[in-house]
Amino acid sequence: MARYRLEARTERSAAAPFLVTGMAILLTLVAGSGLFLIYGKSPVAGFTAFFIEPLQSAYGIGEVLLKMGPLLLIAQGLAIGFRARIWNIGAEGQLILGAIAASVLAIYFDGSTSWLLLPAMVVAAMLAGMAWAGIAAWLRNSFNANEILVTFMLSSIALQLLYYLVTGPLRDPMGFNFPQSITFSPAATFPLLIEGTRVNVSLLLAFVATVLAWIYMQRSLPGYKLVVGGLAPQAALYAGFSDKRAVWVGLLIGGAAAGIAGVGEVAGPLGMLQRNISPGYGYAAIIVAFLGGLHPIGIVFSSALMALIYVGGDFARLSVGLPSAVTTIFQGLLLTFYLASALFLQYRLRRVDARPPVQAAAAEGAG
Amino acid sequence: MTETLIFIVAGTLAATVPLLFAALGELVAEKSGMLNLGVEGMMATGAAAGFVAAVVTGSHTLGFLAGAVTACLLSCVYAILTTIFLANQVASGLAVGVLGLGVSAAIGKNYEGTTVDPLAELNLGPLSDIPVIGEALFEHDIMVYLAIVAAIIVWYVLQRTKLGLIIRAVGESPSSAHALGYPVTLVRGACVLFGGAMAGIGGAYLSTAYTPLWAEGMVAGRGWIVVALIVFGSWMVHRVALGAYLFGAVSLLELSIQGLGLDIPSQILSASPYIITIIVLAVISRNPALILLNSPVSLGQTFKASN
């Protein structure tokens, strides 16, 4: 009887990453069909609403690009940390801090027409995101505090800070007590990139970040040190690569990217600071980073897919009547199936004969 | 004054139940080397399934059972990913967390706004009649006491039985345990499933006894505080339990301070459990000897038997 055994790959397979991601998507579609059936909808109608309808109109494509921006940006930042085994799961909070910092500038300089305002907002957002993530890096390095827990807790704190600010100090005094700031002036908002959609120039920042991430991770010594630290901590230590430095770099880059994603929202489609600035981009970007194989190019595709799931979820709710929980379940399924499929990045199934090992060895020796 | 005291003690005992059940489960999983970060999602699933079951059947027992079974099924996903597919434990925990949030929202969707009778108080006869103490300690539902019993059982099993020794051996060195002939994968998987069931019971207590209602996001970060509690307790049952009661008290702080009428923004109070968690985490983790000596050596590491 033929049996199969897991065998470690001795060299990296070029095709494996594509097969693995493809397998994860395929399995998600299969499980998704089951999910649609549970809700009494035909899988065809469900998938059409989820993955085809959004791409059939300029509006739909625009919405996908709009959501792809922050996901791509944050996931590039997170992936760098993840490869160094620095687990920043608080990008949502870093995004919120970025949004707050940018909004403070936009509100303080309301009415300004200076072209410097928007770049200053981007820088402020980046620094705020870095500062929020930096707290976790400092606590990890100086107090050995687990960064997974700290970054998560910081996100919850950031959310309360946002609620406080939009109901208090940053609330629009003429806004009938709505928990939101004034509407930003044109100099404090990103110009549209594609007319007729809500896609703005901040999408370009995500692609700039992609190029930078690619250069850093694939072509630079600091990036190499970071990856080695993640793969083989002992070897990295022996080679003199600093562990503490990796913690700082991993978290600060993630914080910077998430902070910029924050300004992209308030100075983009929202045009103001309000209670809801992100539909969980910071958490979804974790999935995006893994699904893209923690590789800058892979993440471009996975962020587009995740954006499509977000927009498709809205379409499916309106046209087929599927609840929004389906979107969350899809996200969870994608990560689950990716992690399962990823086994085949490092292992392959090898058919082994049922003959006892001694015989097999003898046969090999004879051959 | 005594009334405030009674309110705080009685409230703390109830608020701790979900934390303690989930923390005991997570502690056992971590003792075997499995860091399951999906507690939040498992508690949410347990809360939703437990609530729906309690509403439909009218039985709290079936509610807890449904919560335990559903969250246990969810933890199977984590166990399979990490033991069979050798996936990274952190990422697998996050995947289970997201799945759990989605599944719980789907399960509970049609039951938002429904209520269920809270779990009945246990009749402890003369004990409940003792002034002050009776009111604070002996007018509770059965789960308040079962949580304490569960803590004692978990301590006993981990520290005083062969099963506990095997679990700890697997957590310290899976390869040595494997070489000695212990079924590492089976032990780890079972510990994860136990953790899932306990998180489910904790979640079900939230929705069928503590609140008692179902609302999406009602677990509100408790699952993450549970993970932090294990570090606070440096993987020792009595310390984890003590930490759970302290955090139960912290969650009452918000209500008490609002009751006092102090002019503190409600957001600061809402953020306080997280701020306190970070501070305590930093203080405890600062002592590397405490963490290194007590954390299971193989925590977070996948294990593949080399045949």
Image (cartoon, helix red, strand yellow):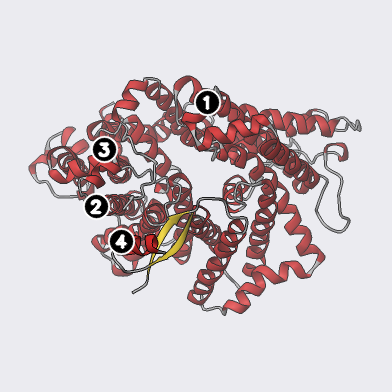
Q: Would you call the spot at circle 3 few (<14 residues within 10 Å), some (14-19), or many (20 or more)?
A: many
Q: Would you call the spot at circle 4 few (<14 residues within 10 Å), some (14-19), or many (20 or more)?
A: few
First of labels 4, 1 by sequence position: 1
Q: CA distance from mark 3 to mark 1?
A: 46 Å
**Residue under mark 2: which chain is it in?**
B
Residues indicated by labels 4 and 3 sit on the same polypeptide chain = no
Residues indicated by labels 3 and 2 sit on the same polypeptide chain = yes
Mark 4 secondary-structure assignment:
helix
- Tell me the mark number nearer the camera, choosing from 4 and 3: 4
Residue bearing the label numbered 1:
A243
Residue B190: % across, % down: 27, 53
Q: Would you call the spot at circle 2 few (<14 residues within 10 Å), some (14-19), or many (20 or more)?
A: some
Q: CB atoms at circles 4 and 2 under 8 Å apart?
A: no
Using the rendered view, name the quadrant where residue A94 is placed. top right
Residues indicated by labels 4 and 1 sit on the same polypeptide chain = yes
Residue B183: mark in rendering? 2
Q: Is residue A262 above or below residue A124?
A: below
| Residue type, mark 2 in image | Pro
First of labels 3, 2 by sequence position: 3
**Residue under mark 3: which chain is it in?**
B
Residue bearing the label numbered 3:
B10
Q: CA distance from mark 3 to mark 2?
A: 43 Å
Residue A307 in sight from this viewpoint: yes
Q: CA distance from mark 1 to mark 2?
A: 35 Å
Residue A45: % across, % down: 62, 78
Residue B205: % across, % down: 31, 51
**Residue under mark 4: which chain is it in?**
A
